[in-house]
Each structure stands twice: as C-alpha cells, then as structure tokens.
Image (cartoon, rainbow, N blue to C red):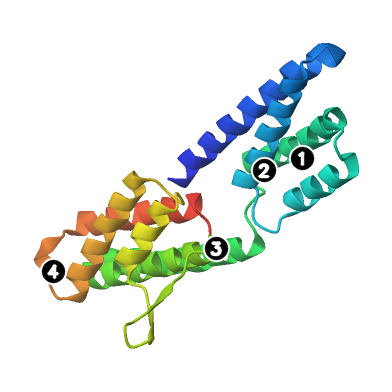
C-alpha cells in the first residue's frame, strides 16, 4: 500500500544519493563513466518519482540546458533536486491541496458509514464504503493518466467498472498486486450488499473494510 510504497521510494532515492556522495568524495579522481552513471540514475529517479509537470522536472530540464555537456556541475545540481524530492516524500509534502480535500471528503463519508455500522445498518455501510472506494479509484486513475472511460463497439463512451480500474491501476504499478487483491475483496462486499446478498459478509468484514479503506486512501492520495 501507499505507506509501503513511500518507504520503497525513499530507499531508492537514498541509494541514488549514496552513490552520488561516493562519486563526489572522489572529486577530480572520479571516473567519467561514474559521473555519467550517477547523472543517469538521478534523472531516472526524478522521472520515476516526481509528479508530471512538477517543479522538480522543470528545474532538472533547465539544469541540463544550462550545463550542456558539463556533467560534473550538472551532477551536483541534479543532486540538490533529488534531495529536495526525497525530503518532500519523507515529510509528506508531496500531497497536494486537491488530494487533501479529497481525503477529507472521503473521510466524512467513511465516518457516516462507520456510524451506520454502529447503528446496526451493515448493508448500508457496505454500500457507502464501496462508493467511496470506487470514486477513489476513479481519482487515482485520473491522477496517473489512466482512462476512466472506454468506447463500446457502438462508439458510445461508458465509464469503466471498479474491477477494470483496479486491474488498470495494478497493471500501471500505481499499487501492488496485494493491494489489487484487497480492493477486489472490498468490491465483492460492496457488490453483495448492492445485490441483496447480505449473508455473504459480516459486520466485522464491513468494519475491516472501512478501516482498511481509510489507510488505503491515506497512503495513496488522489
């Protein structure tokens, strides 16, 4: 899930920064191939982890233009960008205002679902939680450039179903296969509730679904 992904991102950024520090310590004795390698690793990390259209990417592109083929000064400047990116991941500063608003809104709906569950309305709580799940997947797709609609053979535009968005998000590495299986399990509860199959799930399962979805949204903001 998202928190795990953030830890993995930080580990990868730290590895590149460690390699950068090794080459910088060598100074003028650093092999040119190593400098090329580090520059490539830094640019690849920025490309993988910096949001599209972000200042990290803009400044990195500008630095490449300013330094031209002079790779040693470029390496130091790109290292500064990578450190800023790493620090922003570590402090949670990557979350945008839009993501914070969505998280707050979804939290309100999950509070309502929790209240329904406490009052003994597990089926209504399951449907409401499933609706939050579907909308969050839709926003995750939009954030990551994944289409949320498809064309029918009749050329009609239709919204993708939850299962399709789930598969697309996992395929595009937005989250792991373990997360995909978790979303599939939550979707099954929502579908059972929506189709009147109330004995397919328990109050405890809905409670776990609400708690799990809170963590999922917090870890994967959209």
Say if residue 120 shows up in the picture.
no
If you read the primary sequence from the N terminus, does the residue marked by circle 4 or circle 2 appear first?
2
Query: Disc 4 to disc 1, how far (Cα)?
Result: 53 Å
Q: Position of residue 164 (x, y in %)?
A: 33, 65
Residue 168: which numbered mark, if any? none
Q: Considering the numbered disc 3 on the image, is that residue within a helix, a strand or a loop?
A: helix
Of 67 and 51, nearer the camera is: 67
Within 10 angstroms of label 2, few (less than 14), some, or many (20 or more) residues? many
Tell me whether circle 1 and circle 2 mark residues in contact (CB < 8 Å). Answer: yes
Residue, x 12% and y 70% (percent of image)? 197
Mark 2 and mark 3 lie on one chain; the one further toward the N terminus is 2
Dot label at residue 81: 1
**Dot 2 corresponds to which residue?**
46
Q: Which residue is mark 4?
A: 198
Q: Which quarter of the figure is the N terminus placed in?
A: top left
Residue 174, image x, y percentages: 46, 52
Q: Which residue is mark 3?
A: 143
- Of the residues under marks 1 and 3, which one precedes in the sequence? 1
Between discs 4 and 1, the one toward the N terminus: 1
* CA distance separating discs 4 and 2: 48 Å
Residue drawn at the location 67% of the way across and 22% of the way down: 18
**Viewer-nearest residue: 108 or 201:** 201
- Please say if the residues under marks 3 and 4 sit with CB atoms less than 8 Å apart: no
Contact (CB < 8 A) between labels 1 and 3? no
- Front position in the image: 2 or 79: 79
Q: Secondary structure at mark 4?
A: helix
Mark 4: few/some/many CA within 10 Å (<14, 14-19, 20+): some
**Could you tell me how far apart the alpha carbons at marks 1 and 2 are, in whole angstroms?**
8 Å
Look at the numbered disc 1 and give the secondary structure of its residue.
helix
């Amino acid at each position: 899930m998202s928190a795990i992904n953030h830890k993995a991102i930080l580990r990868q950024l730290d590895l590149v920064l460690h390699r950068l520090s090794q080459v910088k310590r060598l100074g003028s004795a650093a092999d040119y191939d190593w400098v090329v390698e580090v520059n490539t690793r830094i640019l690849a990390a920025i490309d993988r982890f910096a949001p599209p259209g972000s200042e990290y990417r803009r400044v990195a592109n500008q630095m490449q233009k300013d330094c031209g083929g002079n790779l040693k000064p470029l390496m130091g400047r790109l290292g500064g960008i990578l450190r800023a990116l790493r620090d922003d991941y570590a402090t949670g500063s990557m979350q945008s205002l839009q993501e914070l608003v969505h998280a707050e809104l979804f939290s309100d709906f999950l509070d309502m679902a929790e209240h329904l569950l406490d009052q003994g309305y597990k089926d209504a709580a399951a449907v409401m939680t499933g609706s939050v799940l579907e909308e969050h997947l839709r926003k995750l797709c939009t954030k990551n450039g994944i289409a949320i609609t498809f064309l029918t053979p009749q050329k009609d535009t239709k919204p993708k179903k939850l299962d399709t968005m789930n598969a697309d998000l996992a395929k595009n590495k937005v989250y792991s296969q373990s997360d995909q299986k978790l979303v599939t399990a939550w979707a099954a509860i929502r579908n059972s509730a929506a189709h009147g199959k109330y004995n397919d799930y328990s109050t405890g399962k809905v409670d776990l679904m609400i708690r799990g979805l809170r963590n999922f949204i917090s870890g994967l903001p959209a």
